[in-house]
Amino acid sequence: MRLARFVAGIGALAGGVAAGGAVMAQDALDGLETIGRPTADGIAFQPAATMLAENIHWLDNFILWIISAICLFVLALLVIIIVRFNSRVNKTPATFTHNSVIEVIWTLVPVLILIMIGFASLPRLFEQMEIPEADVTIKVTGNQWYWTYEYPDHEFAFDSYMLGHPGTLDGDQAYVLNDEVRALLKAKGYAEDEFLLATDTAVVVPVGKNVVLQITGSDVIHAWTIPAFGVKLDAVPGRLQQTWFNANKEGIYFGQCSELCGKDHAYMPITVKVVSQENYDKWLDGAIEEYAGKPRSIAVASN
């Protein structure tokens, strides 16, 4: 009996510590603004929250100007041909079959345009693949149909499910915005219209720090994507790939699995919360307690 009570007491104490860690972790995440999310009838990018995304937006605008100029030029040629060379105005059609000067121009100009686009786009690609020294390292594993995140520097990991996934519910009505899911969204600090975007556990990173992601898959190919960060990389089973980001504004950012991965592909969102360094440290301490990770620092007694 005494042994049973002792074991029960230890279990209760461990549960209390974990619960305390969860509360501490949640407190560090309160009051964040939702920044990166899709909008109804939207046609533009989400606000850029990283240098990577800013440069992608610049490249998109740069290419848009080139495309627009080409389209207007071709339209002008069509109008000129229609007006000047229709059968009523041009009674006697020309008999020549080619023009060497024009043929050289329409070969060289597209080549020069493509070279110009290449010079502008390749640095954007290299920015994403040249991994800087990490301030925070996170291993991301795609599963059918949820994500697993590991913070290897502190030796803890957790799974992240969409709120409304069967793993987050007491009832059996999954993927439906019912009263239980509304209560979950409210308890986690999300708006009702963030259903299908919000997860029960978010990735948390500090603002202004280099976050290196090590991405893989456990079963089929997934893709980890946060549009506001300009980050998208496949999670391939048996392969560990890397990318990175440095978020410049605190807030909540949403993404989705972007590789068709099975029947519940649509219910595999990503939630990232960017917080101050102070709140990140507070969250990290709580997460270490909750998930039995490695403490940030260990004080060593000395005589």
Image (cartoon, rainbow, N blue to C red):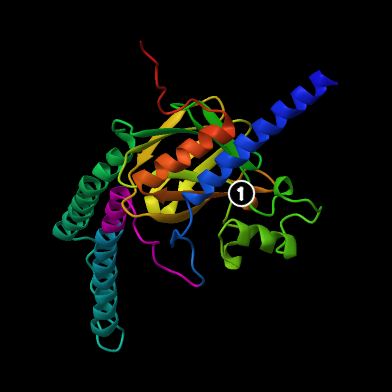
Estimate the x, y position of residue 302 in percent, counting from the top left.
36, 12
Residue to which mark 1 is pinned: 200
Q: Position of residue 137 (x, y in %)?
A: 41, 32
- 31 or 115, nearer to the observer: 31
Left or right of 85: which side holds 281?
Answer: right
Please tell me which residue is depicted at 63% across the width and 46% down the height of the picture. 161
Residue 220: horizontal and vertical position, in percent?
62, 35
119 relative to 142, above or below: below
Q: Residue at x 28, y 80 (%)?
A: 79
Q: Is residue 133 magenta?
A: no
> Is residue 41 shown left or right of residue 135?
right
Residues packed near mark 1 inside 10 Å, few (<14), some (14 to 19) or many (20 plus): some
Residue visible at 75% across and 23% down in the picture = 6
Question: Where does the C terminus fall, quadrant-wise?
Answer: top left
Identify the residue at image location x=56%, y=59%: 189
Residue at the far top in the pictured view:
303
Badge 1 marks a residue whose secondary structure is loop
Quarter of the image where the N terminus is located:
top right
Query: Does the magenta-highlighted stretch encompass residue 56?
Result: yes
Q: Nearer the viewer, residue 232 or 22?
A: 22
Quadrant of the rendered structure where residue 174 is?
Answer: bottom right
Task: Give the extent of the magenta segment.
Answer: 41-59
Callout 1, which amino acid? Answer: Asp
With respect to residue 254, does 134 lie above or below?
above
Query: Residue 207's x, y, as percent?
Result: 34, 47
Q: Is residue 218 visible?
A: yes
